[in-house]
C-alpha cells in the first residue's frame, strides 16, 4: 500500500499530509515560495538522445512492463530475475547521470514527454509536491487501474482525491502503528499461519500465496470471505486487464467487473465485526467518496505485501545473524497479542528496499514546471525509479540485507529510500501492512526454521541480486526444538 509522510515532515498528527503555504501558485504555476525555492535548487533537465531513449526503453521500462505493472506475470518475472534486469537498469541510469548530469533526464517515449529524476532531491521534490503540480492520477495509471477501481484514490483528482484520501486514512488509521482492530488481525494471521504449517512437504510460493489471500480476505472482509477465491480470482483477472491498460476495451471488462463488484458488496454489506469492512461501515464518508470503491485497491496493495512477506522469509532463512535477531525478538510473552516487533518490521521494510514491489512511482505534471534554468511541459510523466535510489551503490549497505538501517536512523538521513512512497502520496496503509506482514513472519518463525531451496542466489557474504523471482520460492521447514 508505498519513506513515510511522517519522515518527510508531512504529518500533522493524524497521518494526513499538510500543504499549508504550498497552496498558492507562483511563476510557471509552481507551488508558492517553497515550490519556487525547490525549482531554483533543482537540476536543469537534460534531453536524452534518441539512442539513449531507446536504451532506457529497453533496459528500464520494458522489463517492468514484461513483469506486469498491475499484476505480476510469472514468465516475465522469471526472465527479469534470470537477467537480473534491475541491475542493468541501475547501471544504465548511473552511466547516464555521469554523462548528462543529475537531471532530471527528459525524453520522448511513445509520443509523450517523460522525465526520469536522477537525483534524490529531484525525486523528493516530485513526491513532496503531490498532488499539485505532480498528480498521482497519471493517464497511464487511470487506464490501468480504471478496470477495477475507477473511484480509487490513486486515480482521483481535486476534491474527490482529497476526500477519498482522508477516508482511506481514517479507515486504515494511517500513522498509527497498531490499528484498533489489531487483536482481530493478529488472531487471523496466526490461525492461517498455523494451518499453513500443517502442509506436508516444502513450502512454495503457491501454498504461501493461497494462505496469504485467505488472510487478506479475512482482514479486509471478514471470516465469511475466507474461502471466496472467486472474488480474488475475478480481481486478478481485472488486474490482468490493467496490465494492458487502454488496449482492453471497456466491453471486455464490464462483465467481470460487475460480478466482482456484486460479490464484494455482498461481503461489505455484512460489515463483519473485526474486519476493515466493519471499520468502513462505521466511518463517515462524504457523498463523492464511494467507500466500497476504495476496497479493491486495498486488496490490490495487499498482494504486493504478500510478496514482501515471502521475500522477507527468504532473506531471514539465508542470513543467520538476522534470523537470530528475529528469534530473540520473539522470545517475549504472549505473542498472540498485537506487538510492534520492530526488528521483524524492519526486516520487511528492508525486503521492500532491496526489491521494491512498486518499482516506478508515477506522477504527471498538471502544469509547466521549472527545473533549475529549464522547464518541463505540462503533462510530463515523471518516473521515480525506486531500484535506482535504493540500490545505486552509494551506500555501503546498498546490496546487503541490513534491517538495522530502519532502526538506527540511517534510512531517515536521506530522501532516497521510499519503500512506501513519500510525501502526501505516501501509502496510507503502511502501518497496517507492516503489522500484518511482520505478524505473519513472526508466526511462521516462532517454532520453525526455514531453509531456502530455490532460488539459491541469496547469500549473506555477497551482494544480493537486484531482481528476485518470488514465484520460484521453495523452502524446507523444520520444527524448532
Image: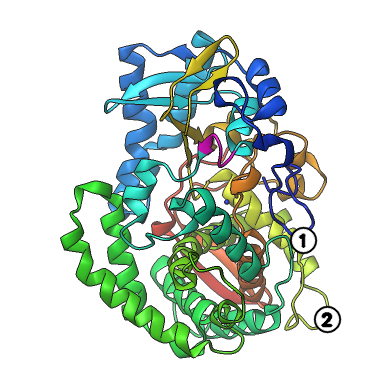
Residue 156 place in picture, x, y as percent: 46, 52
Is 136 on the left or on the right of 428, as rendered? left
At x 45%, y 22%, the residue is 92
For disc 2, the neighbor class at 10 Å (few under 14, some 14 to 19, many from 20) is few
Above or below: residue 150 compared with residue 96: below
Query: Which residue is under mark 1?
Result: 342
Above or below: residue 35 compared with residue 287: above
Residue 333: mark: 2
Is 424 on the left or on the right of 21, as rendered? left
Above or below: residue 18 compared with residue 431: above
Secondary structure at numbered mark 1: helix
Residue 376: mark: none
Is 351 on the left or on the right of 299, as rendered? right
At x 57%, y 54%, the residue is 162
* Span highlighted in magenta in the image: 130-134
**Between 445 and 305, the one nearer to me in the picture:** 305
Asked if disc 2 and disc 1 are in contact, CB closer than 8 Å, the reply is: no
| Residue 434 seen by the camera | yes
Above or below: residue 117 compared with residue 411: above
Residue 254 place in picture, x, y as percent: 22, 66
Asked if the magenta segment contains residue 131, the reply would be: yes
Is 157 on the left or on the right of 171, as rendered? left
**Between 414 and 274, the one nearer to me in the picture:** 274
Amino acid at each position: 500500500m508505498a519513506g513515510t509522510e511522517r519522515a518527510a515532515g508531512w504529518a500533522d498528527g493524524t497521518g494526513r499530509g499538510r500543504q499549508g503555504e504550498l497552496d498558492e501558485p507562483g511563476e510557471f504555476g509552481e507551488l508558492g515560495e517553497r515550490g519556487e525555492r525547490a525549482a531554483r535548487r533543482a537540476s536543469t533537465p537534460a534531453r536524452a538522445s534518441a539512442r539513449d531513449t531507446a536504451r532506457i526503453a529497453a533496459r528500464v521500462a520494458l522489463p517492468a512492463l514484461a513483469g506486469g505493472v498491475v499484476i505480476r506475470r510469472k514468465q516475465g518475472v522469471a526472465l527479469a530475475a534470470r537477467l537480473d534486469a534491475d541491475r542493468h537498469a541501475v547501471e544504465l541510469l548511473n552511466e547516464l547521470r555521469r554523462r548528462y548530469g543529475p537531471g532530471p533526464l527528459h525524453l520522448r517515449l511513445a509520443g509523450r514527454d517523460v522525465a526520469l529524476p536522477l537525483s534524490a532531491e529531484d525525486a523528493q521534490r516530485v513526491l513532496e509536491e503531490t498532488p499539485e503540480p505532480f498528480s498521482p492520477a497519471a493517464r497511464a495509471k487511470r487506464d490501468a487501474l480504471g478496470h477495477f477501481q475507477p473511484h480509487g484514490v490513486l486515480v482521483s483528482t481535486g476534491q474527490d482525491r482529497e476526500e477519498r484520501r482522508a477516508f482511506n486514512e481514517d479507515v486504515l488509521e494511517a500513522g498509527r502503528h497498531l490499528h484498533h482492530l489489531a487483536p482481530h488481525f493478529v488472531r487471523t494471521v496466526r490461525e492461517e499461519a498455523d494451518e499453513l504449517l500443517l502442509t506436508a512437504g516444502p513450502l512454495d510460493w503457491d501454498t504461501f500465496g493461497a494462505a496469504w489471500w485467505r488472510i487478506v480476505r479475512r482482514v479486509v472482509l471478514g471470516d465469511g470471505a475466507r474461502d471466496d477465491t472467486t472474488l480474488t480470482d475475478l480481481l486478478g483477472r481485472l488486474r490482468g486487464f490493467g496490465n494492458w491498460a487502454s488496449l482492453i476495451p471497456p466491453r471486455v471488462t464490464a462483465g467481470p467487473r460487475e460480478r466482482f463488484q456484486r460479490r464484494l458488496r455482498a461481503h461489505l454489506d455484512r460489515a463483519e465485526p473485526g474486519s476493515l469492512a466493519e471499520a468502513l461501515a462505521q466511518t463517515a464518508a462524504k457523498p463523492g467518496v464511494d467507500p466500497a470503491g476504495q476496497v479493491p485497491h486495498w486488496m490490490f496493495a495487499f498482494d504486493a505485501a504478500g510478496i514482501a512477506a515471502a521475500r522477507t522469509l527468504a532473506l531471514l532463512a539465508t542470513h543467520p545473524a538476522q534470523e537470530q535477531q528475529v528469534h530473540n525478538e520473539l522470545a517475549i510473552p504472549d505473542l498472540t497479542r498485537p506487538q510492534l516487533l520492530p526488528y521483524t518490521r524492519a526486516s520487511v521494510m528492508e525486503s521492500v528496499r532491496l526489491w521494491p514491489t512498486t518499482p516506478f512511482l508515477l506522477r504527471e505534471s498538471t502544469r509547466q514546471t521549472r527545473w533549475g534554468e529549464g522547464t518541463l511541459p505540462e503533462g510530463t510523466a515523471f518516473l521515480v525509479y525506486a531500484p535506482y535510489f535504493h540500490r545505486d551503490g552509494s551506500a555501503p549497505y546498498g546490496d546487503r540485507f541490513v534491517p538495522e538501517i530502519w532502526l538506527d536512523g540511517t534510512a531517515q538521513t536521506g530522501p532516497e529510500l521510499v519503500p512506501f512512497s513519500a510525501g502526501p502520496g505516501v501509502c496510507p496503509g503502511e502501518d497496517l501492512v507492516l503489522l500484518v506482514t511482520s505478524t505473519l513472519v513472526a508466526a511462521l518463525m516462532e517454532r520453525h526454521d526455514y531453509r531456502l531451496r530455490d532460488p539459491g542466489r541469496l547469500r549473506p557474504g555477497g551482494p544480493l541480486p537486484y531482481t528476485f523471482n518470488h514465484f520460484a520460492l521453495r523452502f524446507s521447514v523444520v520444527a524448532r526444538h
